[in-house]
Image (cartoon, rainbow, N blue to C red):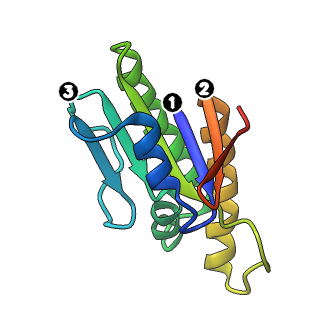
Amino acid sequence: MHFVTGGAYNGKTKWVKQLYSLENDVLWLSGYRKEQPEMLDFQGNTVVLQGLEAWIQHAAEGMDSHSIRKRWKDIIADWRIWESEKEERSCIVIGSDISKGIVPIEARDRRWRDACGWVYQDVASVCSRVDIIWYGINQRIK
């Protein structure tokens, strides 16, 4: 499993597509399009979960931080099982960094920011590789 993070519009998607030469046989699920990130019966080799922060933001509208974190631990665990079933499979998780800047005034926005930080830590801890992308340039941190 590979986690890619960095600033919004800093080239994460382009970098992932180039690194993995993604064209066919890819399941690309997007939090920006409000697609569900849960495990599907996908027989291909590559899954990309893009927009982790968008899924978490949507969840923060009606869930507490603990529930959001648990939900994402379960989702990631399912995709890790899928990935482990065949050696050629890989799951890539992409999430924009929202931790910079001023702490939000609204409780919902603080819940979103906090939940993102915790979920990102959980995802990074189980991934074999973690990269940060700034201005189209990667820095491998794990």
Question: Residue placed at 21% from the left, 32% from the top?
Answer: 42
- Distance from disc 3 to disc 2, alpha carbons, whole Å, reads 22 Å
Which disc number belongs to residue 141?
Answer: none
Question: Residue placed at 70% from the left, 63% from the top?
Answer: 114
Sequence-wise, which precedes: disc 1 or disc 2? 1
Sequence-wise, which precedes: disc 3 or disc 2? 3
125 lies above or below 7? above
Badge 1 vs badge 3, beta-carbon distance below 8 Å: no
- Judging by the rendered image, the residue that carries numbered circle 3 is 43
Badge 1 vs badge 2, beta-carbon distance below 8 Å: yes
List x then y, in percent, for residue 130: 64, 37
- Distance from disc 1 to disc 3, alpha carbons, whole Å, reads 17 Å
- Please tell me whether mark 1 sits on a helix, a strand or a loop: loop
Disc 3 residue type (three-letter): Gln
- Judging by the rendered image, the residue that carries numbered circle 1 is 1
Q: Residues within 10 Å of mark 1 (few under 14, many from 20)?
A: many
Sequence-wise, which precedes: disc 1 or disc 3? 1
- Judging by the rendered image, the residue that carries numbered circle 2 is 128
Q: Nearer the viewer, residue 80 or 65?
A: 80
